[in-house]
Image: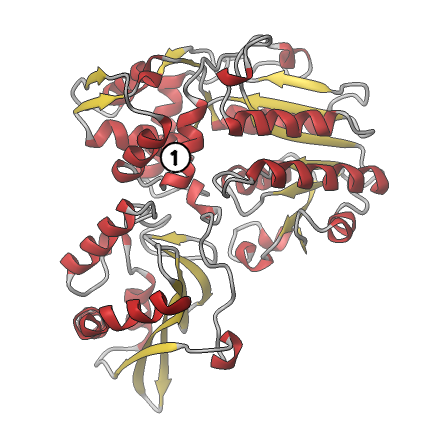
Amino acid sequence: MNAPLCLVTGSTGYLGGRLVTELLAAGHRVRCMARTPAKLRDHPWADRVEIVRADALDPAAVRRALDGVDVAYYLIHALGSGPRFADTDRESARVFVAAAEDAGVGRLVYLGGLGPAAGSSARDSSPHLRSRAEVGEILLAGAVPTAVLRAAVIIGSGSASFEMLRYLTERLPVMVTPRWVTSRIQPIAVRDVLRYLVGCATLPPDVNRAFDIGGPDVLTYERMMQRYAAVAGLRRRRVLPVPMLSPWLSSHWVGLITPVPGALARPLVESLRSEVVCHEHDIARHIPDPPEGLIGFDRALELALTRIRDADVATRWSSAATAGAPSDPLPTDPDWSGGTLYEDVREAEPAASPAAVWRVIEGIGGTNGWYSWPLAWSVRGALDRIVGGVGLRRGRRDPHRLRVGDSLDFWRVEEVVPGRLLRLRAEMRLPGLAWLEFTVADHDGTTHYRQRALFHPRGLFGHAYWWAVFPFHGLVFGGMRRGIARAAER
């Protein structure tokens, strides 16, 4: 008898990428649904799963993806995707339910958000929590048995909630904070979330309901920061709550201090305005707690920090695409853009082997820097943060190796051909689309290095932007070419 076939949506994201590993370890067959399958190519499990291309809003494509599936994991959220995110969430959920019913799927599993207690006013819940609750209701109302797991803050290396907590605590020994730091929260370790998700694959067919899931600790956000400081070996933080910081102002403040961009910080902040604690633990009837108990908050922090120190972060919040960032393929032919494509090309023949040059290229960014005029990069990153972009603080997933889909400061890896090509797509705030491409080759025993910056302007302001920064290209891109060549030669 074949093992159950599980479809994982959101597999390019934080939880989805980890869930695939756990499902395979549990003996399940896995199919991943993605709008851009190439982003999954470099994952360690890519050759062990089936990958299908589908947009969640395309009924025919979703139906094909669900063909023959026993359990479907719905891990899709329009988080930070603009003012109409709730409409997108609602429509994609309806498409998925209809396709699952038509395909004869045995079970749906959805991870939503833990909201205020039943009977609370709608105003007590954030728009994003209300949208997640609505998605859960749509899935539960369908003909396919559904398990909805509702979680608050997820603590694990690379999660947006953890990164926000981590950077706020580490960078601000004294902080002026909004009132939401006094809200009670029941965080949960990512290991326990994954254990519940995998366990839901074998729930009895008559189970069709929502479950609250959380760890053993209930804390205020202020207490979470103090506990983080203690676990990380930092001095006690001084927290000064003030009443006038709105969620909008708070999200910009979080965006400036942490690697989490403002568009993602706002729904996270809004969800912390009200108490988010579990009101039942019925999930234990079907998926019992481990003998040692659920992972406590301090232990979850220790596990996450150990992963980070060991550079062993399998997936991160930034693995998912940033809302509003360019997502088009690189225009290898200028005619693709239907207009102007600006290009800055730099070449060199370093006295080093192609392998040595490639090691420098693949190690670029993060703590290694960009090999040219650090002040210019720092200023550009700071300006990006001010206008709500991601800035430079996302860093790298791994200090030595890149894979398609990785975030790299304010770039994202669009293509990697080991030893030959690295192509980055810009995710900073720009009036157009931008790419940075590095290639290395052996021409008759001579190492040839080529570097291309491409910019497809949007509107008159896009053209003005290119010519405004053009005088600095010699310092930034010319310096990068020289710096990479020197580093390879060393």
Which quadrant of the rendered structure holds the N terminus?
A: top right
Q: Secondary structure at mark 1?
A: helix
Residue 282 falls in which quadrant of the image?
top right
Estimate the x, y position of residue 327 in percent, counting from the top left. Answer: 50, 59
Question: At 51% from the left edge and 56% from the top edge, which residue is drawn?
Answer: 42
Quadrant housing the C terminus: bottom left
Is 414 rendered above or below residue 288? below
Q: Residue at x 36, y 39 (%)?
A: 262
> Residue at coordinates 54% horizontally, 12% vertically from top-left?
121
- Compared across the picture, whether 271 is left or right of 246 comes to right
Q: Residues within 10 Å of mark 1 (few under 14, many from 20)?
A: many
x then y, percent, for residue 11? 58, 45
Residue at 52 percent of width and 28 percent of height: 127
Q: Is residue 462 visible?
A: yes
Give the residue type at disc 1: Ala
Q: Position of residue 258 (x, y in %)?
A: 29, 37
> Can you give x and y, in whole percent of width and height, for residue 96 in the image?
73, 40
Instruction: Say which residue label 1 marks.
Output: 265
